[in-house]
Amino acid sequence: MPEPSADWWKSSVVYQIYPSSFKDSDGDGVGDLAGIVEKLDYLKLLGVDVVWLSPVYPSPWDDNGYDISDYTGIDPRFGTLEDWDRLRDGLHERGMRLVMDLVINHTSDRHPWFTASREGDEDKKDFYFWRPGRDGGPPNNWGSVFSGPAWTYDQTRGEYYLHLFSPSQPDLNWENPRVRAAVHEVALWWLARGADGFRMDVINFVSKNPKLPDGPVAGDYGIFAEHAINGPRLHEFLHEMHERAFAGRDVLTVGEMPGVSVEQARIHTNPVNRELDMVFQFEHVDLDHGPGGKFDPRPLDLVRLKASLNRWQVGLNDRGWNSLYLNNHDQPRVVSRFGDDGRYRVESATAIATTLHMMQGTPYVYQGEELGMTNAHMDDIADYRDLETLNYHRTMVETGKVDANAAMAGITRMSRDNARTPMQWTAGANAGFTTGTPWIGVNPNHIGINAEAAVADQGSVFHHYRRLIALRKEHPVIVHGSFTPLLEEDPRVYAYTRTLNGQVLLVLANWSGQRAEAELPGDLAAADAELLLGNLPDPGPVAAPLRPWEARVHLIR
Ligand code: TEU
């Protein structure tokens, strides 16, 4: 286990594993903990420091494990607590850490807490949001993230319960101090077992306007975000959890916060407030959502993406800390979404990675991103497994509310299942993921896009990620340097500098399939710079034009 040191997570790179799709060791078609242990040397070669493990707790699997029925166990599909211990030890032996996914805004409706609550148990009756109906319907007009109303009537209790996600994910009532104490106990239980921190699911949803008022109507329902996120007690709840569970411990805490602003994140991640180390914000991954939402996508506007990411870089500099991500289990594969997964797949994947990894913050690599894995391009709804996707198709497409072809195109481009197809290990059967029948289809392009081929090819996306990760360890300017945006209105080139103790890191990336000139300020253009890393052969000097999807990192000492 590496020596604890203050803020180790600032110079770390985190690798997210979506366990059901990473590696299956027992042939049941679902990834498992023992499968992850088989691949630890692969992760060590990549150079990542931390593994963030998406949920592996017992779950009815409505939302692929984000509906938890037992917070201190392992779902049999993934193995046992002893398997988890072996994963923990395997990571620690290699100098890596293990961060767990805490889903504590809601439980599964099969969790014993909910069972007791619906039956009116004295201790649990207020563990969730129960309300009588209004005018024969739900208590307010909120809609769920996963389509439909955010309330379901329960015959046993005779009241409605709140679920901002699916009816199988009832929201915990954090106004109840016993709920908060129970959640703190869960965190302490995993820390005692050797976990090194937590990713906290929609953690800014845990404080809601206690009156639960109607939201402004959009479509069939009211928008819950007006009153159910970033609520009045959020800072209090986060600080309380920090003091009860994290204070004095050498752990990484990252809060997933859909809808958080830079201003709020500056408070959440300012160490003096003792809340969280960093947050996952969503501004940059919501930019291509059209008027009809995520399944009504619009092409990327690079100038808007630069403005968003740059705002977060400048906004948190010296006061908070950024997480840096463009991929995860909820987002389509960035090389298909913002890059070019055809002619310039390797070039665009590495240019995008260079742009992100040289910024200030902790980079998160999602499984397969380091291979340049692409969207699945599935155009038959029968191939999808994701609750959000299937609910959207059922409630909007099958009802005729949206045009079926346009919606299916949106689903093909934006569904979360694009990130959840099995990890591509080899060109062989099922991409070497399983000897059984995979729970979701394997991308046919695993023939050419797989870890075995990538590790053997020094020009692969994998080795570019490995070099980016290594640079972060070698140059303090990458971790601690201030950020200065350049060429903010340029529609093709992403450019910025990082500065520390007189050293200037210049990052140039052409996010287009055309040649581009970076019109740099004279002092930079003429600088005598050392080339630290390029993504194409024979990279030129600072002033050299940028070839299609070319990225370069120059150091001016
Ligand atoms: O996601 C939170 C969230 O906002 C999701 O709605 C996600 O961003 C959305 O699907 C994008 O369209 C977290 C988890 O990451 C996600 O996997 C869970 O489904 C969700 O919470 C409920 O736990």
Image (cartoon, rainbow, N blue to C red):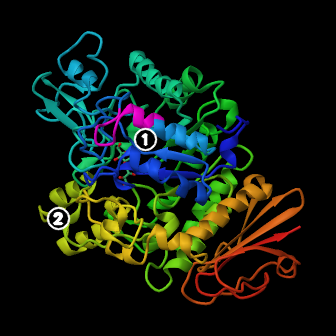
The residue that label 2 is drawn on is 382
Q: On the picture, is 320 further left or further right than 140?
A: right
The residue that label 1 is drawn on is 202
* Magenta-span inclusion, residue 78: yes
Is 67 in front, or is 235? 67
Front: mark 2 or 1: 2
Whole-number angstrom distance, CA of label 2 to CA of label 1: 29 Å
Is 333 in front, or is 316? 333
State whether residue 433 is above or below residue 126.
below
Is 554 in front, or is 310? 554
Amino acid on which disc 2 is placed: Ala
Q: On the picture, is 193 further left or further right than 155?
A: right
State which region is magenta.
74-85
- In which quadrant of the rendered view does residue 415 lie? bottom left
Label 2 packing within 10 angstroms: few (<14), some (14-19), many (20+): few
State whether residue 538 is above or below residue 25.
below
Cβ of mark 1 under 8 Å from ligand 1: the answer is yes
State whether residue 425 is above or below residue 112.
below
Q: Position of residue 182 (x, y in %)?
A: 41, 20
Amino acid on which disc 1 is placed: Val
Residue in view at x 42 percent, y 65 percent: 425
The furthest residue to the top: 122
Q: On the picture, is 434 further left or further right than 267?
A: left
- In which quadrant of the rendered view does residue 270 lie? top right
Q: Secondary structure at mark 2?
A: helix
